[in-house]
Image (cartoon, rainbow, N blue to C red):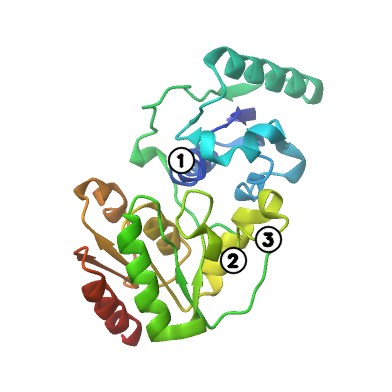
Amino acid sequence: MFDVAAFGPFVGDWKYETFVFRPYIKWVSETISIDKLYVSSHTNRLFLYDWIDKDNRIPIYEDVSRDEILQNGSLHKNVTRSDYNLFVKLYKEELSKRCSCYINYFPLNYTNFFQYPLYCRLFSKIYTNKKNEGGYYLFIPDEMEDIMIINEIYNLLTKEYGNDIIVCGDMKTRLGEKNVVLSKKDYFENGYQYILSYINNAKAVICPMGFWTFLVNLQGKPVFSWVTNKGNTVYRNILSGKEYNIIQTNNPNIIIKGFNEFIKM
């Protein structure tokens, strides 16, 4: 049993935070009896830690959170190891002002290849207060897929479903000019909550097989994906339930035909 446990600071990207860092904290908090939890992360993603008291979620520098493109895995390209050590020092100083007892720190190894093993992660649905009307199909055009294929799929989707197709995603997805979230004035404050809201209210989601497939499945929504890269099996192996379908092709016409059949099931 711990009186106090502290995690972070986290400066990396959305994908790593939701697939590795958040579920690790969730696993520790469910495995070990802890009286008080603290976490430090991006100011616009502290909502991820809804089981931790709001006052105990401590934001990092906002400029680091706004530099979304420079966030990479557990790292930030403009944050050196020395910078990160300073962040840790300031975090500990802040916690020492709040707690007089011993604090158990769970440090994040600031390296490119650091991963918590899957058996030390507890995946759980992410909640958000943002609301929007449903009745649409959501297309998340991950940047991992070739832009030519993404464009052709989008054109086929809009031809088939018209205004019932909505494009959504963060700054690391394609078709930014059509993205309903990137156009919002408060994107940097609430963008990820909007993304989750669009996922949660969609009739079904279509995206390349990868992180977004995992996230949609985590939220309990139907998701259809195509795969051409065997390296994405890390996500495929942890999908749960029956409301997902993955086909192996990069042919846009086959992908759309598969999606049409999927949403009729």
Indicate whether 49 appears above or below 263.
above
Residue situated in front as seen by the camera: 190 or 5: 190
User: What's the residue type where badge 2 is placed?
Assistant: Val
Q: From mark 1 to mark 3, how far is it between C-alphas?
A: 24 Å
In this rendering, position of residue 128 left or right of residue 229:
right
The mark found on residue 180 in the picture is 2
Residue situated in front as seen by the camera: 86 or 52: 86
> In the rendered image, which residue does mark 1 sit on?
16
> In the rendered image, which residue does mark 3 sit on?
184
Q: Is residue 223 visible?
A: no
Residue situated in front as seen by the camera: 222 or 104: 222
Q: Secondary structure at mark 2?
A: loop
Q: Quadrant of the C terminus?
A: bottom left
Residue visible at 19% across and 64% down in the picture: 249
Q: From mark 2 to mark 3, how far is it between C-alphas?
A: 7 Å
> In x, y percent, where is residue 171?
53, 50
Q: Quadrant of residue 20?
A: top left
Residue visible at 74% across and 45% down in the picture: 54
User: What's the residue type where badge 1 is placed?
Assistant: Tyr
